[in-house]
Amino acid sequence: MAMALRGKSVSLVMPCRNEGKHLSGLIRKIVSPPSPQDFDEIICVSNCSTDNTLEVGAVLEKEIPCFRMLQDDRAIGGIGYGYAHMTGIAAATGEIIVCADCDGTYPVEDVALIVDIMDKQGLSFVSCCRYPDSGIAPMLQLGVKLLNAEIRLLYGYRIQDSLSGMWVFKKSVVPDLRLSAGDWNLSPQIKLNAFSVLGKKAAEVKIHQLKRYGQTKQNYVRTGLGHAWWIAKNRFASSR
């Protein structure tokens, strides 16, 4: 078991779909010398995988004591990103929960710095912000800016990265996050609920996005339009 980070136990939750080619290398990189990360447990949740992701996970469970492989194949329109996250978060036992996509794009090695910021600023929830970043495709940056503007108009929150897939938060606030979106919309939902309920105890922290393992599972235009509709629908549903 890894040494607790700054005296706290930390769980890393990673949803995955068809990451069999990359999963072993990613997990071994996280836990291996010379600079293993201080996670007490790493929970990967396979959602609707059709490759050998589960088999690779089973091997990792035998070889890496802190690693757990779970499965949740619920989906909405073929997407179960949110369900995988919710299953992993429910299973996590750490005082601090870190959520990050299983494609290697999020710098989980920065968690110690983020937790230090949380301690110094009295934060309970951090959404890791990728923007601005010239290395990210302009079309993606434009899409996120439009969603950020929609959130600012409808909710009044100045969020810089409404679709970040990396969050660090205290396990104690999980009930406050009221997670229910089983598809991609868990990403805006977790931020909107955190900022709504936690107020100044929720904030964004800048990170740098890393190179992706494999190919994206998203159709960006369809996903973006789905987010825009969900953000508006959620705002007016919550005002009733």
Image: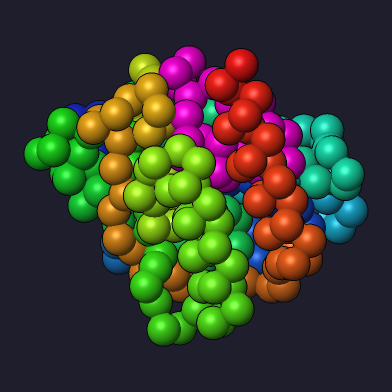
The magenta stretch is 174-193
**Residue 162 image offset from top left, x and y in percent:** 49, 52
Q: Nearer the viewer, residue 16 or 239?
A: 239
**Residue 52 image offset from top left, x and y in percent:** 83, 55
The quarter of the picture where the N terminus appears is top left
**Residue 186 image offset from top left, x and y in percent:** 62, 39
Residue at 86 percent of width and 57 percent of height: 51
Q: Would residue 216 appear left or right of 157 to someone viewing this image? A: right
- Residue 59: say if magenta: no
Q: Quadrant of residue 173?
A: top left
Q: Is residue 119 above or below residue 117?
A: above
Q: Nearer the viewer, residue 208 or 59?
A: 208
Q: Nearer the viewer, residue 82 or 157?
A: 157
The quarter of the picture where the C terminus appears is top right
- Residue 179: say if magenta: yes
**Residue 205 image offset from top left, x and y in percent:** 29, 53
Residue at 39 percent of width and 58 percent of height: 160
Residue at the left extreme of this rendering: 120
Q: Is residue 192 above or below residue 187?
A: above
Predominant SS of the magenta segment = helix
**Circle count:** 0
